[in-house]
Image (cartoon, rainbow, N blue to C red):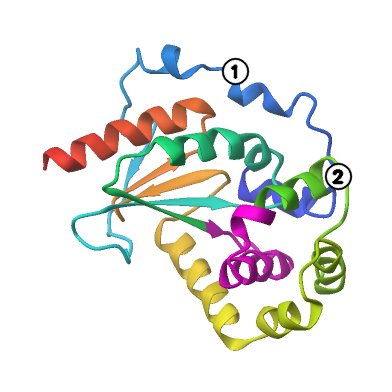
Amino acid sequence: MQRRDFSRSLLAAGTTVVGASAGLALTPALAQRVGPKEGVDFVRLPKPAPVESPASQVEVVEFFAYTCIHCFNFEPLFEEWIQKKPAHVTVKRMPVAFSPAFVPMQRLYFTLEAMNLVDKLHTKVFKAIHEERLPLTTPAAITDWVAKQGVDRARFSELYNGGPVGEKANRAVQLQDAYSVEGTPSLGIAGRYYLNGQGPRTLVVANALIAELRKG
């Protein structure tokens, strides 16, 4: 979803999946027949974005928003790709904030990360918003929902409202700006390339760029 569209859709967190998966119709096998083109499939950053991974690793950053229906549809594809990725690829998920309204959901992700609950609850957050149509866009709604998942409310609130999670949210905004993120889902590759979401083809392009980086 493009940045300009979020102002209209952020609070429509219960949008149905029907029709939104049209961008995922391209299969990886079909996409692989067409080589990725700079300026079309990806952008080479004029100034490298910061990376945290060691030089021996290729850092892949997924920019997403919990309220983005396309991110919800992309998630199982990306998760499958993560399970099959080479050992030299490091993956980071990065929740975007195109406005202050996104910050509560940014803090949700980073709190789940701090509590080692991403594997357990990340996908459930997407489903709660897009299938159950729960408006998990405010701290109160988020905390209530997390507590219903069996998470200690007091500990979650302490971390959610704490400085370290706030610092991660601030760094996430800095990174999205460094990659000039204009929509979600999208990928940043090694601080050098930015890919807008193109369904399964996104991962075909990512594989091609990762292979090129390894050659260099």
Q: Is residue 39 visible?
A: no
The residue located at (76%, 69%) in the rendering is 151
Residue 198 lies in the magenta stretch: no
The image quadrant that residue 92 belongs to is bottom left
User: Left or right: 112 with respect to 211?
Assistant: right
In this rendering, is residue 94 above or below 157?
A: above
Q: Is residue 111 visible?
A: yes
State the residue position of label 2.
14
In this rendering, is residue 169 above or below 126?
A: below
In this rendering, is residue 216 above or below 96?
A: above
Residue flagged by tag 2: what amino acid is it? Gly
Q: Earlier in the sequence, mark 1 or mark 2?
A: 2
Residue flagged by tag 1: what amino acid is it? Ala
User: Left or right: 117 with respect to 67?
Assistant: left
The residue located at (85%, 63%) in the rendering is 145
Q: Position of residue 85 (x, y in %)?
A: 36, 39
Q: Nearer the viewer, residue 125 or 215?
A: 125
Real-space Cα separation, disc 1 to disc 2, in angstroms: 22 Å
Magenta range is 94-121
In this rendering, is residue 115 above or below 130?
A: below
The image quadrant that residue 179 belongs to is bottom left
State the residue position of label 1.
25
Residue 116 lies in the magenta stretch: yes
Q: Quadrant of the C terminus?
A: top left
User: Left or right: 46 with respect to 66?
Assistant: left
The residue located at (72%, 82%) in the rendering is 155
| Circle 2: element type | loop
| Circle 1: element type | loop
Q: Position of residue 171 (x, y in %)?
A: 48, 73
| Label 1 close to label 2 by CB (< 8 Å) | no
Q: Position of residue 123 (x, y in %)?
A: 68, 47
The image quadrant that residue 24 belongs to is top right
